[in-house]
Amino acid sequence: MNSLIHLAVLALKQVTRHRIRSLLTIAGVAAGMFLFTAVETMQSSLRAATVAGTEDTTLVVYRENRFCPSTSRLPEHYESDIRRIPGVVEVIPIQIVVNNCGASLDVITFRGVPPEELESFNPELEIVDGSYATWTDRSDGALLGENFAARRGLKQGDQFEAAGVRVFVSGIIRSAEPQDNNVAYVHLPFLQQSSRVGLGTVTQFNVRVEDSTKLDSVATAIDALFKSDQAPTSTKPEKAFFAQTAKDMVEMVGFTRWLGFGAVVAVLSLVANALLLVVRGSVKENAIFQTLGFSRLAVGSVMLWEGMILGFLGGLSGCAAAVIFFSWKRFTLGNEGLTLALSPDLNVTLAGLAIAVGLGLLASLWPALVASRKPIVKSLRSA
């Protein structure tokens, strides 16, 4: 164990001796791992938004064959009919207004809900600034998700206008659901009038069922109930609805995985090339090490440690930069009223760092083999 530590210390000294070469290699690895972590952050956010789990018990009732919120119009009185379906726990009508229905960055989404029902339907919402009372007292009040507010530089007491809707910021909310952190909740009657759809018409209903095993049966019952009505419905689990409605955005994010693979290959090549240059420039040093009693395995181990140190330092820099970047910019991708928040994830960051170290080790295998197999006499003569 002590010998491994001594070899690691020696490798670190080798890295610090050649500062410019090491810094350039670390910078290259950092750039590659920044790209890889950014891509994995997008993939992780997408999985969180589209892959259902046992804890997911929400259905979205939408107008059949309609996707953009402006084309989905359902009678508000459907709420009472849905409540009577066995397995339904809670129903909330929602009117949605967006500034851009297509795929775009930084989409602004207003969700109009009955103010007296939001807290009971979504009890995990946390008010971090302002209060529910302030919101319910003003018909033009809005509760902004904390990411939404941060992107726009808004705080409690401000006013802003978007998509033809002008609101007063009554509070800032935080939620475990990424969607809630990127929308503005307003009063349903206010948004119906502001968007000119008229009272009594909503975009969708969010329905909570008793448990996830009843999602399909309740969805089938809802669609069967309104099949012959004036506005037939299409009901899906919330994450399945996201995956279908925002399929263009899903495909776009899915394509970025190839960029991640490219970043991995680039890091692997960069570290291997740097270490091969080290081997060529350290022929005499390696020969001296062997003369002093270092085994060939020890000489090769020093090279392996160098690769892992370069990978670790570059990976740490790149992954940390990606976390800071996404925490600072708070990017969201929006499509048809749905938002995909790109949030840094600890598991993704740790995985990126582990991959960087692994790539450094993998890239150093061949240089280590070359360094350890070179005969002492030949090394001393060629130095």
Image (cartoon, grey):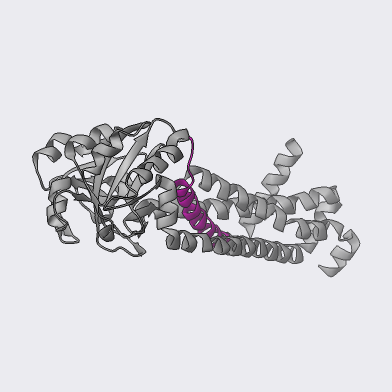
Which quarter of the figure is the C terminus placed in? bottom right
Position in image of residue 202 (x %, y %): 22, 50
Left or right relative to 277: residue 158: left
Which quarter of the figure is the N terminus placed in? top right
Q: In the rendered structure, does residue 261 fall within the stretch colored magenta? A: no
Position in image of residue 13 (x %, y %): 65, 51
- Residue toward you, 34 or 84: 84
Left or right relative to 47: residue 373: right
Q: Is residue 275 visible?
A: yes
Position in image of residue 20 (x %, y %): 58, 64
Q: Is residue 56 visible?
A: no
Q: Is residue 239 above or below residue 374?
A: above
Residue placed farthest to the bottom in the image?
A: 382
Q: In the rendered structure, does residue 44 fall within the stretch colored magenta? A: yes
- Which residue is at a point 36% across and 42% down the rendered structure image? 222
Left or right relative to 294: residue 252: left
| Magenta stretch: helix, strand or loop mostly | helix
- Residue toward you, 344 or 294: 344
- Which residue is at a point 48% across and 35% down the rendered structure image? 54
What are the residue bounds of the magenta stretch? 28-56
Position in image of residue 352 (x %, y %): 56, 50
